[in-house]
Each structure stands twice: as C-alpha cells, then as structure tokens.
Image (cartoon, rainbow, N blue to C red):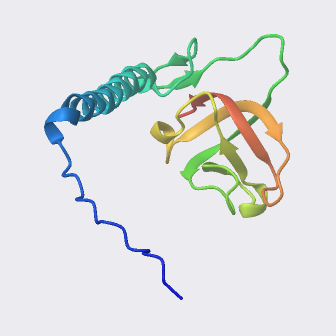
C-alpha cells in the first residue's frame, strides 16, 4: 500500500513590514495621547472649581461655611470638632459634654469640615440613619462659636 504524500512545501514567513503600517501605529499613539491630554485638562478644570471646599452657592469664610434652606427644618448641635468618625460612619465628630455617648458623628456632602477641626463650632444638618453612631448628621452649615 502506498502512502500519500502529506508533506507540503514550507512557506517562508513574511517579515513584518513596519513601513507599511507606521501611519496606523502613529495614528493610534496620537489618539491615546490626545485622550490622556483631554482627561488631564478636564480634571484640572474641575479640580480648580472645587478649590473652595464647598458646593456651588454655599458661603465660605474663616468663621462659617455652608448655606441653609429656609424651607427645611435642620437639626443642630454644638461642640469641639474632631477628625474621625466611628467604624466608617462619618469623617468627623463633635465632642460634647457627657462623653463619647453624646458625640455627634458628622459627614458633609456640601462643605469641607477639615478647616474647622479642633475648634468649637455649631453645626446644622440632617440626621441620617446609622448602625454604629448614636447620632449621625449630614452637615449643611458650620459656624465657629469661639
């Protein structure tokens, strides 16, 4: 019995012709570079807008920050503002007379609380549901007391 010839001639592998594809490679590189540059410019634009640390329309000064909506009834508290929440709830807390059970844990989507740390302040905001904090508030306005 005769065996069929299963061997085929080996074809030479073509060498990659960079000259043929260089416009595509260069174009792809420029598109990626333009995307990175655009993202950087947009990010810088938004970072400069938020430099005040407050939402649009909110007052910011050395003694107070934020704004109250006259049609809303806010809760208020007073104490020494300290950095840190409790078990992931809040970014800051108010130390008040009566110890840790009387602390008010705070977060704010409107103002930057960091510039008032270690100062006696009065805050207005909305009480939020919390799992660990006895009193958790989203602050709308903060004012120095002393």
Quadrant in the rendering for residue 49? top left
| Relative image position of residue 92 (x, y in whole percent) | 60, 49
Depth check: 6 or 36 in front? 6
Q: Residue, x 70% and y 17% (percent of image)?
A: 68
The percent coordinates of residue 74 (x first, y second) are 80, 26
- Which sits in the foreground, 113 or 62? 113
Q: Which residue is at 49% across, 25% downward?
A: 63
Dividing the picture into quadrants, the one containing residue 133 is bottom right
Residue 16, relative to residue 78: is it above or below? below
Q: Quadrant of the N terminus?
A: bottom right
What residue is rendered at 64% in x and 55% in y? 85
Q: Quadrant of residue 12?
A: bottom left
Q: Is residue 15 visible?
A: yes
Q: Residue furthest front?
A: 1
- Residue 110, x across and y down, in percent: 61, 27
| Residue visible at 38% across and 28% down in the picture | 39
Farthest bottom residue in view:
1
Q: Is residue 110 above or below residue 102?
A: above
Check the image and report above or below for 82 versus 113. below
Judge left or right: residue 113 versus residue 69. Answer: left
Q: Residue 103, image x and y in percent?
A: 72, 54
Report the side of 114 relative to 35 (left or right): right
Whether residue 30 sits left or right of residue 4 in the image: it is left
Give the tally of numbered discs.
0
Q: Is residue 99 visible?
A: no
Q: Nearer the viewer, residue 137 or 94?
A: 137
């Amino acid at each position: 019995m005769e065996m069929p010839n299963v061997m085929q001639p080996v074809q030479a592998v073509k060498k990659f012709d960079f000259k043929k594809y260089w416009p595509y490679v260069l174009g792809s590189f420029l598109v990626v570079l333009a995307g990175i540059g655009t993202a950087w410019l947009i990010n810088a634009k938004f970072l400069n807008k938020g430099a005040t640390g407050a939402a649009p329309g909110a007052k910011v000064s050395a003694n107070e920050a934020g704004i109250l909506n006259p049609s809303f009834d806010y809760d208020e508290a007073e104490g020494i503002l300290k950095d840190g929440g409790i078990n992931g709830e809040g970014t800051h807390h108010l130390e008040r007379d009566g110890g840790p059970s009387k602390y008010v844990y705070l977060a704010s989507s409107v103002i930057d609380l960091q510039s008032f740390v270690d100062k006696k302040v009065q805050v207005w905001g909305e009480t939020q549901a919390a799992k660990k904090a006895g009193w958790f508030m989203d602050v709308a306005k903060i004012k120095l007391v002393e």
